[in-house]
Structure formats: structure tokens, C-alpha cells
Image (cartoon, rainbow, N blue to C red):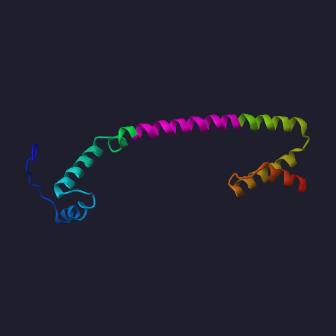
Amino acid sequence: MSNKNKHTIWLPDSTWQKVEDYYRTDNCAAKNEFIKKAIEFYVGSLHTKNANAFLPEVLSTTLTGTLDGFASRISSLLFKQGVDINLMAQIIAYDTDIDEGTYERLRGRAIRDMKRTNGRISFKDAMDFQKSV
């Protein structure tokens, strides 16, 4: 009991009933422990602007580093994919002779196919369609 003092507090019966109902659920040995934890949590939430007070700092740092690395990797891959798609489009446009109307119809079909399949369309699907036309 060192560094502990007895304090009297006045609580509505409904609040005290919550303490009674939940202190065991939180694996507290006594209601005092539950109330202490609740006060510390609430005070911590008042003094912080982020989750660092509630998450261990190592976990927060690890998650931030992992997500930053993931974002960099995805950005790099999307840039590379964009370059490759543009190169492919340039090569195909150089060797293709289609009119504006055909282009617009193909673009419309491509948009509908992407929406219908949630982006899961393959080159083989496009090739099969072109051979059927």
C-alpha cells in the first residue's frame, strides 16, 4: 500500500454498477485497479493527439515504417507500370491504323470490361474478343 492514499468519491449508482460489471472482465483484481486504469486512460486521451499514448511506441514505429515502405514500393511499381503501358501504347499506335470512332468504341468497351471484372481482365481476354470481331 505504499504511495497510496484513501480517497472518497461520489458516483451515481449507474456508474458504480458499470465498475461492478466490468472490473473482472478487464482482469482487474479489485475495483480500485479498474478505476485507476480508467482514470489513467482518460487522462492519457486528453493529453494526446495521436495513438502513441495507447499503442506501444515500438508497435507504432514498426507500423509506420512498414506502411511507408509499402507506399514507396507501390508508388515505384505503379510508375514503372505506367511507363511500360505508355511505351506499349506508343508502339501500338505507331503500327495501327484505326479511325477515331473505332478508338472510342474500344475505349468504351475497355472501361465497361474493367468495371465489370473489377480490373481483372487479361491480355488473352482482349485477344479473344478481337479475334471474334
Q: Position of residue 38 (x, y in %)?
A: 24, 52
**Residue 49: percent from the left, percent from the top?**
35, 40
Q: Is residue 62 magenta?
A: yes
Front one among 111 and 60: 60
Asked whether the viewer can see residue 133, the reply is: no
Query: Relative to 89, does residue 26 appear above or below in the rendering?
Result: below
Q: Which quadrant is home to the C terminus? A: bottom right
Q: Which residues are magenta?
A: 59-81
Q: Magenta span has 65?
A: yes
What residue do we see at 23% from left, 50% from top? 37
Q: For the stretch drawn in magenta, what is the main secondary structure?
A: helix
Residue sitting at x 84%, y 46%:
103
Figure label count: 0
**Would you identify the image quadrant in which residue 73 lies?**
top right
Is 87 situated left or right of 53 in this image? right
Q: Position of residue 78 (x, y in %)?
A: 66, 38
Q: Tell me if I can see residue 21 in this picture.
A: yes
Q: Foreground residue, 86 or 1?
A: 1
Residue at (9% x, 51% y) in the render: 7
Left or right of 105 in this view: 9? left
Query: Looking at the picture, how far across and down is residue 54, in whole percent?
Result: 33, 45
Please give left or right for residue 8 compared with residue 78 in the image: left
- 72 to the left or right of 62: right
Q: Is residue 33 above or below residue 54?
A: below
